[in-house]
Amino acid sequence: MKKLFILLSILVAGTVYVEACTNLIVGKKASKDGSVMCSYSADDYGMFIGLCHFPAGKHSKGEMRKVYDWDTNEYHGEIPEAEETYNVIGNINEYQVSIGETTFGGREEMVDTTGILDYGSLIYIALQRSKTAREAIKVMTGLVETYGYCSEGETFTICDPNEAWIMEMMGKGPGSKGVVWVALRVPDDAICAHANQSRIRTFNIKDKKNVMVSDDCIGYARRMGWFDGADKDFSFCDAYAKPDFSGRRICDARVWSFFNHFSDDMNRYIPYVEGKQADTEPLPLWIVPNRKVSLQDMEACMRDHYEGTPFSLDNDPGRGVWDMPYRPTPLTYTVDGKKYFNERPISTQQSAFSYVAQLRSWLPRQIGGILWFGNDDGNMVAFTPVYCGNTVRPECYNTKGADAVTFSNKNAFWVCNWVSNMVYPRYSLMFPSLKEVRDSLDNSYFVNQPAVEKKALSLYENSREEAVKYLNDYSNTVAQQMLDRWNELAIYLIVKYNDMAVKPEKDGKFMRTKTGLGAKVERPGYPESVARDIVRQSGCRYAVPE
């Protein structure tokens, strides 16, 4: 994320960035239920955010909209307001249009620091003005071509119930108010992803049905001396943001991990994502999955840590005593003058929020669109359903007084982070308790969904407003129930696992002695693999004399 990346270090020939997000995309014929699905993990250290809302509205001629940078809240300027704007809740609008992003940076000289629109503002303005994905692309590109684009290179996911698109965009330098961009329609039977590395290579400029492109996309690269071949050979990625080591290993490796869940042929791309060999076969932009992708699959992929792959985080000392699949930041560290890096999986501790959008064309739009939302690392939260017609946010996702430095036990971001930060360092010890609660909530939402939507459809026949209110009330109720359960979980964890011991339970209650004291605790000690590592590294230092 963030419009201006922070340079950390050079790895081989590559740049590593602090902020990093992940988007996963599923076409309607690739999904199990026929929905278009897309996901977004908004990852940025120090970021505090809940569930945004922009109400629908009518606007008078001459009315202006002030634009504030999504990352910094700095004022950029103003643009004319649209005559009509649509209801937006989170990253979905009332017409089931959903937009996400990941930042890839690209050539620094292409950033237009004088532009008004940053990537985040552009997303939410487009959601307010678009009924389809194609319309959103036209709105977004039209706005930046008029008012300038002040972010770095960006990949956008733009979906509606019928189509999924991936669009990449860069400015043309300070004061230009110009952009180069290309948008490709993801085939209905395919899955796609992006994770902070430009992904679009060659494209058929004549395929108007599936390709949208700026007039100057190729010509600008020619004038700048970055490309001199035929149009058919032009690669957006290679011209404007050629992948280096970090772009492959730290970014595209997350795409590989998603594809690997639905392909029997991803080993061939391991040399590419390892990032060490120059001439290797790059990842395809999309693949046809070997099975239909379910909503549950998407949530699971948002919780991925490269488990069972060559990039798994369970085989080095960074895992700690209890096999933590997370690593401290920054992404690189130096030992004796040499730089090293950490694996960066899809699921990461710096997620401010994550979601899976489910977009269904066969239902009335206010019922068909759902944002399955979590206000923390996707692995550490239950995704509660937020219907696209909702106009009132639950208190836990919109808590008065809570912010990045103000804790509130009424706020989902803080309560979920409270729990996850207890679990991270004692992962294998404590995570099973979190997972049990998380999965129980998730499964209850899946089980309830048919009955909830059946009732909503019944209400919809007589009153659209009643149906929307019913779904809004349901969304808010389960979100608040999740928060209550998470507060209980926080207390349970500190009691059960206090001082690295484990209190025994029976029938869901902590055990006591006959005299009413807490039962004798269990002391799990080191896992065998850690004990062996200590002996191997310390030799006889800790050996007990015979």
Image (cartoon, grey):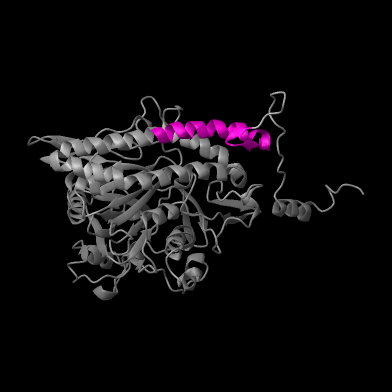
Magenta stretch mostly in which secondary structure? helix
Specify the farthest residue to the right: 546
* Residue 122 falls left or right of residue 49: left
Q: Nearer the viewer, residue 472 or 47?
A: 472
The image position of residue 188, as x and y in percent, is 27, 65
- Span colored in magenta: 481-510
| Residue appearing at x 28%, y 50% in the figure | 99
Judged left or right of residue 340, residue 143 is left
* Residue beneath the point at 24% across and 67% down: 218
Q: Is residue 17 left or right of residue 449?
A: right
Instruction: Say which of 275 and 322 sits in front.
Output: 322
Residue 114 at least partly seen:
no
Residue 295 position (above or below residue 397): below
Percent coordinates x, y for residue 456 in the rendering:
23, 42
Question: How far across and how far down the image is residue 331, in percent?
Answer: 53, 51
Report the residue at 47% width, 56% height from top: 15
What residue is at 10 percent from the left and 40 percent from the top? 83
Does residue 388 sit above or below 198 in this rendering? above
Q: Nearer the viewer, residue 91 or 95?
A: 95
Q: Is residue 127 above or below residue 188?
A: above
Residue 173 image point, x, y percent? 28, 53
- Quarter holding residue 185: bottom left
Q: Does residue 395 show up? A: yes
Of residue 505 and residue 242, the one placed in the foreground of this image is: 505
Number of labels in the image equals 0
Residue 482 located within the stretch drawn in magenta: yes
